[in-house]
Image: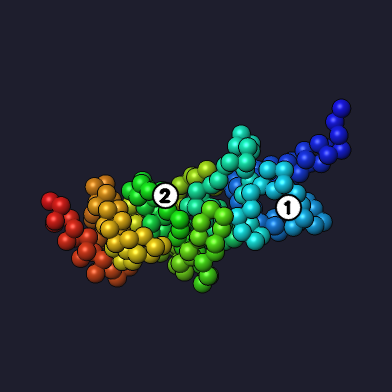
């Protein structure tokens, strides 16, 4: 016999499934529940108690994959950052950059505690249960981007060429070491289109960064 409690859990699950189908984003905000519930903050807390959501920060939650609701699942900070950016600003106006792009592109093998996200506004860093999101004010329309699909959402990440330039321009952005930035640049050099790098450097007025990349290319030859 189905209890009233079981019915309520299924109802809550149904609303979250509907939101996920609409947005394609596992990150949701308390305000996203407002069309379904009169008290969205209270409902988000209930969904968290039932293991359907995990709280990321005040007002932000992540929908736990149905096959991972054993209480042990935690998302990667890069996935969280991109999901938050898409939820707040839309797919076209946010992108993973710098060390976070390097992580997605596979040239920084070790997990990071911070993620760096380009957004269209000035915004303070946000500490989440997955790590810290560092926002950098940038017009994504001026960046060289490619699509990426994470466990959480589909969005944008900088291309290898743009990431190479970014790591030469601001190597310590996101709290990585200079050694880590150099390691990532070396790996990116092996599969980047260097003519594309030069073209981006000219368009973005990054002559100094191009000099760093040229020196490292010559040293590795």
SS category of the residue bearing label 1? helix
* Closer to us: 193 or 220: 220
Where residue 26 sits: x, y (%)? 60, 47
SS category of the residue bearing label 2? loop
* Closer to us: 4 or 81: 4
Q: Earlier in the sequence, mark 1 or mark 2?
A: 1
* Closer to us: 72 or 63: 72
Could you give the CA–CA distance between mark 1 and mark 2, rounded to whole angstroms?
Answer: 29 Å
Where residue 37 sits: x, y (%)? 80, 53
For the point 70% across and 57% down, the residue is 30
Residue designated by label 2: 111
Quick check: marks 1 and 2 in contact, CB under 8 Å?
Answer: no
Q: Give the total number of marks visible in the rendering.
A: 2
For the point 47% across and 69% down, the residue is 137
Q: Residues within 10 Å of mark 1 (few under 14, many from 20)?
A: some
Q: Which mark is residue 45?
A: 1
Residue 51, by quadrant, is top right
Q: Which mark is residue 152?
A: none
Quarter of the image where the N terminus is located: top right
Q: Is residue 42 above or below residue 152?
A: below
For the point 32% across and 63% down, the residue is 171
Where residue 164 sits: x, y (%)? 30, 57
Residue 149 visible: yes
Q: Is residue 40 above or below residue 21?
A: below
Residue 92 visible: no
Horizontal placement of 94 versus 23: left or right? Answer: left
For the point 71% across and 59% down, the residue is 31
């Amino acid at each position: 016999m189905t209890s009233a409690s079981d019915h309520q859990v299924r109802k809550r699950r149904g609303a979250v499934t509907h939101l996920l189908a609409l947005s394609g984003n596992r990150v949701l905000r308390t305000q996203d529940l407002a069309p379904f519930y009169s008290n969205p903050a209270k409902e988000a807390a209930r969904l968290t108690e039932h293991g359907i959501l995990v709280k990321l920060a005040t007002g932000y939650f992540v929908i736990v994959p149905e096959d991972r609701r054993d209480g042990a699942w935690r998302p990667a900070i890069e996935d969280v950052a991109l999901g938050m950016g898409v939820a707040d600003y839309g797919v076209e106006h946010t992108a993973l950059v710098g060390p976070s792009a390097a992580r997605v592109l596979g040239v920084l093998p070790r997990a990071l505690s911070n993620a760096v996200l380009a957004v269209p506004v000035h915004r303070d860093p946000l500490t989440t249960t997955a790590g810290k999101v560092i926002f950098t004010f940038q017009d994504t329309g001026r960046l060289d981007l490619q699509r990426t699909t994470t466990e959480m959402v589909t969005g944008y990440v900088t291309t290898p060429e743009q990431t190479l330039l970014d790591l030469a321009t601001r190597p310590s952005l996101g709290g990585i070491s200079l050694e880590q930035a150099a390691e990532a640049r070396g790996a990116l050099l092996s599969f980047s289109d260097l003519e594309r790098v030069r073209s981006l450097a000219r368009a973005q007025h990054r002559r100094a960064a191009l000099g760093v990349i040229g020196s490292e290319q010559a040293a590795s030859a």
